[in-house]
Amino acid sequence: MLSVKNLVAKYGHIEALNDVSIDLKEGQIISIIGANGAGKTTLLSSISAMKKPESGSVIFMGEDITGMKPNKIVKKGIAHVPEGRHIFAGMTVRENLLVGGYTSTKQEIKDTMEEMNELFPILKGRESQMGGTLSGGEQQMLAIARGMMAKPKLLLLDEPSLGLAPLIVEQVFQIIQNIRDQGVSIVFVEQNAKKALEICDKAYVIENGRISMSGTGAELLASEAVTAAYLGKV
Ligand code: ATP
């Protein structure tokens, strides 16, 4: 469904991605793990066209989408939920969700809003609450729900559990699996490597802009190198 081929991305002279290739089959959860500054965010941004790669290609559903405009990428079925949530503090929950559904018709928006209430029970009954007054976990749910309003086939999530209390982290990971169960494929970047590896179908480790390892979540959980670098001593 998604094939990233030999991607190279730079910021000035800094090479953020060097010959990165990843593959995702429909219905899979792929997790990307790596240290700070390894290039994880740049990889997601290159897929959603927020960052223009120097070379390499992004193939989605058989089509080369490299260099397409970000809004066209959304219409193709890719939604990107960036790190830090970026919800609109001065807008209500409903208004925030409407922003995510900007490519949809009125009827689609109505139906999708109802689906979001099912998928994100934490947001139920909060339609008119201001985004800025939600808790960190609720804001993260809203950010993911806003991404889902575009009815994506592929959801890109950057650090969805960052800064959240353990109980909310559990809920976010459950939501990610529920979204996958609805047929939406997911690529997500996580600092919480253990949890990420437990729920993903396949994972890639990025080090200094290069993929250093890949495998099923179980394979990487069993790897001594991954344990030492990302999981701490157990
Ligand atoms: P983190 O987990 O800290 O968010 P990351 O793995 O997502 O890190 P990136 O944000 O993709 O890493 O950064 C990869 C490299 O590119 C880093 O060296 C970073 O400093 C650099 N970089 C990222 N964004 C920019 C930018 N806008 N301008 C210049 N350099 C950048």
Image (cartoon, rainbow, N blue to C red):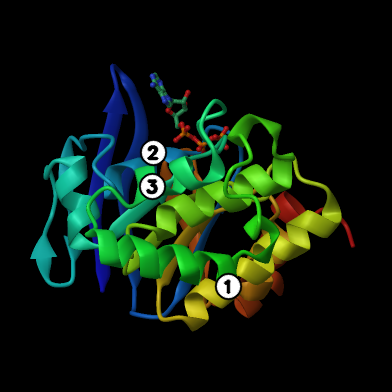
First reached walking from the N terminus: tag 1 or tag 2: 2
Q: Position of residue 163 (x, y in %)?
A: 74, 39
The circle on residue 42 is 2
- Density class for disc 3 (Cα within 10 Å; few <14, some 14-19, many ≥20) is some
Does the CB distance between marks 1 and 3 fall below 8 Å? no
First reached walking from the N terminus: tag 1 or tag 3: 3
- Which of pointers 3 and 2 indicates the residue nearer the eye? 3
Does residue 49 show up? yes
First reached walking from the N terminus: tag 3 or tag 2: 2
Amino acid type, mark 1: Glu
Foreground of the two, 41 or 27: 27
Foreground of the two, 12 or 201: 201
Amino acid type, mark 2: Thr
Q: Quadrant of the C terminus?
A: bottom right
Q: CA distance from mark 1 to mark 3?
A: 17 Å
Q: Position of residue 91 (x, y in %)?
A: 51, 32
Amino acid type, mark 3: Leu
Q: Position of residue 50 (x, y in %)?
A: 28, 36
Q: Secondary structure at mark 3?
A: helix
The residue that disc 3 covers is 98
Does residue 200 show up? no
User: At 59% across and 43% down in the image, what residue appears?
Assistant: 128
- Asked if ligand 1 lies within 8 A of label 2, the reply is yes
The circle on residue 161 is none
Q: How many marks?
A: 3
Foreground of the two, 228 or 30: 30
Q: Quadrant of the N terminus?
A: bottom left
User: At 67% across and 60% down in the image, what residue appears?
Assistant: 172
The residue that disc 1 covers is 118
